[in-house]
Image (cartoon, rainbow, N blue to C red):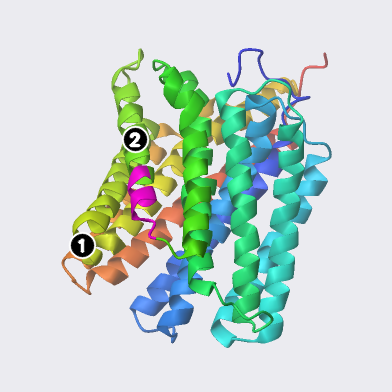
Amino acid sequence: MFNQGGLSLEQAPPISVVLNFFITASFFGLLLGLYLLGDSTQLLPTNDYAFDLTVVHLLSLGVMASFMLGALFQMLPVLAGVVIHAPVRKSIVINALLIVGIVLQLLAFHTHNRLLYLGAAIVLGVALLYATTMMLKELIGLKDHSSSSRGMLFSLGSFALAILLGVYLLLSLGGYIDGRSFEEIKTAHYSFALFGWVSLLIISVSFQVVEMFYVTPKYPDMLSKYLILALFILLVFKLLTLLAGISTTAITILLSLLFILYGGITIHRFYRRRRPTSDATVWFWRLGMGLLIISMSIVILNRSIGIEDLMPLSYLSFIGFALSIVFAMIYKIVPFLVWFHLSNQGYIEAPMMHDVIHPKRAKIHFGIHTAMLLAWSGSMLLEFQLLIPLASLLTTLSFGWILYHLIVAWRQYNYIQQNTEKIEW
């Protein structure tokens, strides 16, 4: 299902590797929703500085990094043919250090304690650089690269740069280095984390899974061969121009245009799919691509005619894009993995994919997710403060919904292993 050569248990990591990361990500998302709810109802006293940094890093590290590292442990073997040795032990170490590092970082933001900044820099740096270098080493060793494996390489390269820049920022905030180029490094850190790590990984995975999962026409060869390379080169140029004190407007506009091109072509792929039946994951993909186009269009308008007031909506749209694609992938990957692992182990009563997470449940989540984005958009555009507690509540519900279904899928897998018979091959 994942590649032309098929998928075997020798290639795929144990399901616990993926689900542990996914559950961690959903838990941090639930924590993010509760944090937003506490702030919006004035139950949680905080300052704007600590609030902004907490929200950004709960979302980027707690949610997105956890989801994507879990996905990479699964996708690298099946899309790139990369075998990660001892995946259980390595994933446990990375996941545990990531959790500890995030907690230290959040405490540092709220207390400004120098030792906490240093601890966060060390723990997060070790955890994430260990993960990226381990995966990069295997990818670099491949003799033949597909568009997806090449894209993963550039995505992980972007993540490594984002991590190094992030360590610099943490040490600067802790007063361990002078932080002379703090603002420029911060901009580059966000660019490599969002436009590089998150976006390039989504794009590289989409080049294979969109066609396979949804039976769409292939992406144009020019796009699949050169888009990711072009985006990565532009990100590097943006970093250099930032450090040189030169305007990045032209580079930012070009980056945005390329993302709009990708989003438009992906939407077109879905409208031309050969199996026209629709499900919630198709809705998530279409919504995500639409939000990417909106986000990048606002960036272009801001750089061209100056509409700074709409930039928060651009950030929200980009977050909505990333989360929409992540949710679409979870509702495809997790039911398949539960069925795949149990059936390959010989369990007669291995559940069908619809029995793990029913498609109706995914449709309900799509409604919650869309309502959440509309509520946050309304609070920004209309400056209607009463929408903020509602949006925060919907954020909590959205991540709580996915967390509940991941735990149910994990318990179902364990129950069948422990209580049903299997065929001895």
Please name the residue shown 62% across and 81% down the image: 178
Q: Residue at x 72, y 75 (%)?
A: 119
Q: Is residue 121 above or below residue 304?
A: below
Q: Residues within 10 Å of mark 1 (few under 14, many from 20)?
A: few
**Extreme residue in the left direction:** 382
Dividing the image into 4 quarters, which one contains the C terminus?
A: top right
Q: What range is drawn magenta here?
A: 247-254
Q: Quadrant of the N terminus?
A: top right
Circle 2 residues within 10 Å: few <14, some 14–19, many ≥20: many
Q: Horizontal placement of 303 versus 122: left or right?
A: left
Q: Is residue 225 visible?
A: yes
Nearest to the observer: residue 393 or residue 79: 79
Going from N to C along the chain, the mark reached first, 1 or 2, is 2
Residue 49 position, x and y percent, is 45, 80
Q: Residue at x 49, y 19 (%)?
A: 212
User: Residue 219 location in percent, x, y?
Assistant: 42, 21
Q: Amino acid at mark 1?
A: Ile
The vertical placement of 293 against 110, above or below, is: above
Q: Secondary structure at mark 1?
A: loop
Q: Element type at marker 2?
A: helix
Whether residue 350 is visible to the viewer of this picture, yes or no, is no
Is residue 360 covered in magenta? no
Please tell me in which quadrant of the rendered image residue 135 appears. Answer: top right
Which numbered marker is on residue 263? 2
Name the kind of residue labelled 2 in the image.
Gly
**Quick check: 423 left or right of 158?**
right
Where is residue 175, by image quadrant? Answer: bottom right
Write down the residue under mark 1: 307
User: Which label was assigned to residue 6?
Assistant: none
